[in-house]
Image (cartoon, rainbow, N blue to C red):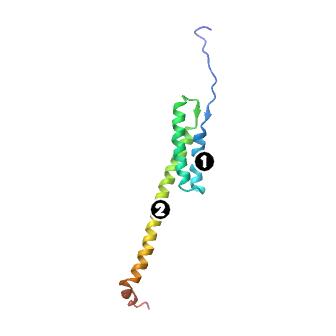
């Protein structure tokens, strides 16, 4: 073989299973596996990114891993907001019923509603 001839190897790029799992669990977070799907999406997304970076181009799926990570982090954010809203509603309902039973109840009952 002379120096002008170049040997090319046909290496097929495979998609990372971790990236696929990240995307599936990120979608599952919005379908029925609330919060747990987001945690799994984040963990598998970072594992997939690490695997893809170390593979030197033999493993693909970086877009799937990034999509899973985005869905996972958005799912975590929505879960935290939902939890905070639930706490605020519970405190408001309990606080409102306490206010109606306390010293303000006499003042509220004296208001003419006609």
Residue 20's x, y, as percent? 60, 42
Q: Is residue 47 above or below residue 108?
A: above
Residue 29's x, y, as percent? 57, 53
Question: Which quadrant would residue 1 be assigned to in this image?
Answer: top right
Q: Secondary structure at mark 1?
A: helix
N-term mark: 2 or 1: 1
Q: Is residue 52 left or right of residue 14?
A: left
Q: Is residue 85 above or below residue 109?
A: above
Residue hosting label 2? 83
Q: Nearer the viewer, residue 9 or 101?
A: 101
Residue hosting label 1? 24
Q: Is residue 95 above or below residue 15?
A: below
Q: Nearer the viewer, residue 35 or 1?
A: 35
Can residue 14 be seen at all in this image of the molecule?
yes
CA gap, disc 2 and disc 1: 24 Å
Q: How many marks?
A: 2
């Amino acid at each position: 073989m002379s120096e002008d001839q170049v040997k090319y190897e046909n290496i097929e790029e495979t998609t990372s299973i971790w990236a696929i799992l990240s995307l599936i669990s990120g979608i599952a977070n919005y379908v029925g596996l609330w919060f747990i799907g987001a945690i799994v999406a984040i963990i598998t997304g970072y594992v997939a990114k690490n695997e893809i970076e170390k593979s030197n181009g033999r493993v693909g799926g970086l877009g799937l891993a990034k999509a899973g990570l985005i869905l996972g982090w958005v799912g975590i954010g929505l879960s935290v907001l939902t939890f905070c809203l639930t706490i605020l509603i519970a405190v408001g309902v309990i606080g409102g019923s306490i206010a109606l039973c306390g010293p303000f109840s006499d003042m509220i009952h004296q208001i003419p509603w006609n």
